[in-house]
Image (cartoon, grey):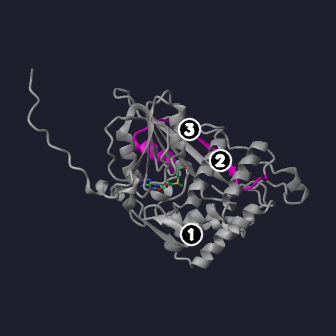
Amino acid sequence: MAQHSAQQEVIEVDPAVLANRHLNDYAASGTASLSSSVNSYILENGRRYSTYFGMDRNPLPVDELEQDRLDMHHETMLQLLDHKLYLAPIENPKTIIDIGTGTGIWAIDMADTFPDSEVIGVDLSPIQPEWVPPNCKFEVDDAEEEWPYPDNYFDFVHLRNITQGITDWPKLMAEVYRCTKPGGWVELAELGAIAKCDDGTMDDDNPMKIYFEHLDKALKVMGRPAGNPETMAARLQEAGFVNLGWDEKKQPIGPWPKDPRLKNIGAMVMLNTESGGTPGFHSYGMAVFTRVLGLHTDYADQLCAGAFNAAKNKNNHIYNMFYVCYGRKPEENEEPKEAKGKEKEEPTEPLQADKDDERDGAVDGEAKEEEQ
Ligand SMILES: C[S@@+](CC[C@H](N)C(=O)[O-])C[C@H]1O[C@@H](n2cnc3c(N)ncnc32)[C@H](O)[C@@H]1O
């Protein structure tokens, strides 16, 4: 029988772990140095922004107010998609990744939905909860750098509302493609930054319209334009994905729709702009208005407050769009074929305002398509 070999090398204990021996968790010791450096923040206009990967990476705050907003917005988007977490026709995925996971709420829901899967959420900031399903984990990383995952690994790659943080989509999509399994799916979901209205209740000087015009412009100046279905489809197609499908939903801003489901969604959107002041508008607007457009803080603040007041005004029947676009990585020996292109439904019906609003004379009855 083989003898036990001579002395195994003793594993040295990190002095940081030895410190503060009266405490027994890692977080309380100096081993938290990684998490403390990824927790580098600045305070700006009363909000906390992450700086670990650079000031310019994510123009949205990461404070508790923002985390609450993200969680509530997740619920709104679920309702917009009829309680579906995704639209791609995935079946029994075993490996899932959520890029720009934020608070990780989508990743956690996916891990609960597919308990046999492994779900990874990646974000620039460690703002995810500690207690998560055993098949879910989070990593702090910049998704625009080379990914640490093997080729052909994921059954499903999900990217939602991250466009304001991405400068090089072709580079990112090349990594998405490399790491997606042949036959696996990727789904992009983004909000549009254009205020829309179907019934003429949004004049050109409506503060919400003005807010969104500034936001749209700032994102374009940054080279990170807001969601747009053509661009999203092109990103997938150019990376090599096929069988593209897409859908778009109107996200009412305020509880003005007649339809009870949309009324509820609009109420949630309004609540999300309301809790703690103007979080939704403030989150998206302040950094880009001041840093990118060079606006004075007071003016940027006024733009956000104007949009907030417009959201609360029941005579403004405004919405923005939520776009979802997905595609499949071809099988290894699959005959190259034309991508199917967009499976777009006919333009959606104009959202009908609640009768109470009409009685107030708020609706002029004329449907008006504001833009595309
Ligand atoms: C608006 S939040 C959306 C969060 C989540 N996807 C959701 O829909 O609830 C945008 C998130 O994307 C993250 N993000 C932006 N750029 C990123 C990048 N290059 N790499 C990783 N995460 C990024 C931000 O840190 C932020 O948490």
Say what secondary structure mark 1 lies in: helix
Q: Position of residue 59 (x, y in %)?
A: 49, 64
Q: CA distance from mark 2 to mark 1?
A: 23 Å
First-in-chain label (1 vs 3): 3
> What range of the chain is rendered magenta?
231-256
Q: Decide which of tag 2 and tag 1 comes sooner along the chain.
A: 2
Label 2 close to label 1 by CB (< 8 Å): no
Distance from the alpha carbon under mark 1 to that under mark 3: 30 Å
- Pick the quarter of the image with the C terminus: bottom right
What residue is pinned by disc 2?
76
Label 1 CA crowd tier, 10 Å (few <14, some 14–19, many 20+): many
The three-letter code of the residue at mark 3 reads Tyr
Three-letter residue code for mark 2: Thr
Of circles 2 and 3, the one toward us is 2
Residue 111 placement, left or right of 238: right
Disc 1: which residue: 286
Q: Please determine whether, in this image, residue 236 is positioned above or below residue 114.
A: below
Disc marking residue 86: 3
The residue sitting at 68% across, 60% down in the picture is: 275
Q: Where residue 324 appears, x then y in whole percent?
A: 56, 43
In front of the other: 47 or 311: 47
Q: Which mark is residue 148?
A: none
- Quadrant containing the N terminus is top left
